[in-house]
């Protein structure tokens, strides 16, 4: 009879991996170190994740899923395009601020080649709210008819730029000003004249 795997133990591996990947880098973190941090033997790790790549992939999917659930909980149908983008902007930054290890991991692996193409494509399902916001903006005539991928990329990169500045800004008033300024720069770049 096959052994039933514990969802709690699986999550322990994911939590340990996230912590160690952020502290040491993905490439410098062994599966043995992850297993040790999770309080198990290396063999137990491989029951849950046959390869380190499987763990890397699952971690990016988990982060995408959690962030998406949070953002989607903030969005409602009656928001204008501007309100939708503002909600995504603030929601993304707040979620990353509350989940800094997830932010650092995501930044570490996003464009590194460490995530398999199929996983990148699968994880895009979590971020459909970006594209729905863009489609709403285009339909309302609220944004310029730029390519969808360009607007989505600009939104993501602008959020990253603000997040990078926020790590150096410790005061809440200064942080709020940076967040507002960042959104203004983004919105002014895409809004229709």
Image (spheres, rainbow, N blue to C red):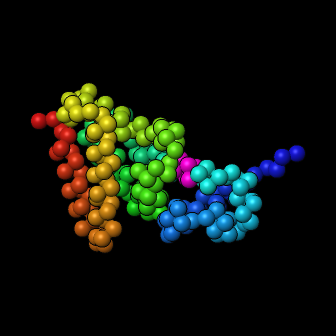
- Indicate left or right for 161 with 108 as reference: left
Residue 161, image x, y percentages? 29, 57
- Identify the residue at horizontal 46%, vertical 45% (top origin): 68
Q: Nearer the viewer, residue 52 or 125?
A: 52
- Identify the residue at horizontal 28%, vertical 39% (top origin): 150
Residue 170, image x, y percentages? 31, 72
Question: Residue reaching furthest top?
Answer: 139
Residue 28 can be seen, yes or no: yes
Question: Residue reaching furthest right?
Answer: 1
59 drawn magenta: yes
- Indicate left or right for 13 with 56 as reference: right
* Count of numbered circles on the image: 0
Residue 87 can be seen, yes or no: no
19 drawn magenta: no
Question: Residue reaching furthest bottom?
Answer: 170
Quadrant that contains the N terminus: top right
Residue 176, image x, y percentages? 26, 62
Instruction: Classify 123 as above or below 170.
Output: above
Q: Nearer the viewer, residue 33 or 162?
A: 33
- Identify the residue at horizontal 58%, vertical 62% (top origin): 17
Q: Which residues are magenta?
A: 56-62
Quadrant that contains the C terminus: top left
- Identify the residue at horizontal 20%, vertical 56% (top origin): 181
Instruction: Classify 82 as above or below 103.
Output: above
Residue 108, image x, y percentages? 44, 58
- What secondary structure prevails in the magenta region? helix
Q: Classify residue 160 by image quadrant.
A: bottom left
Q: Nearer the viewer, residue 172 or 13?
A: 13
């Amino acid at each position: 009879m096959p052994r039933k795997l514990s969802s709690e133990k699986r999550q322990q591996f994911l939590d340990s991996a996230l912590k160690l990947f952020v502290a040491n880098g993905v490439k410098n973190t062994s599966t043995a170190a992850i297993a040790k941090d999770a309080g198990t033997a290396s063999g137990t790790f491989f029951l849950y994740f046959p390869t380190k790549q499987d763990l890397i992939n699952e971690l990016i999917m988990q982060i995408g899923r959690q962030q998406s659930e949070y953002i989607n909980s903030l969005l409602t149908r009656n928001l204008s395009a501007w309100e939708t983008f503002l909600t995504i902007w603030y929601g993304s930054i707040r979620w990353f601020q509350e989940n800094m290890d997830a932010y650092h991991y995501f930044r570490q692996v996003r464009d590194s080649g460490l995530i398999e193409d199929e996983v990148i494509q699968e994880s895009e399902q979590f971020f459909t709210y970006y594209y729905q916001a863009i489609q709403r903006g285009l339909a309302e005539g609220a944004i310029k008819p730029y390519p969808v991928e360009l607007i989505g990329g600009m939104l993501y990169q602008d959020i990253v730029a603000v997040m990078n500045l926020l790590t150096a800004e410790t005061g809440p008033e200064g942080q709020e000003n940076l967040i507002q300024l960042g959104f203004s720069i983004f919105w002014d770049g895409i809004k229709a004249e």
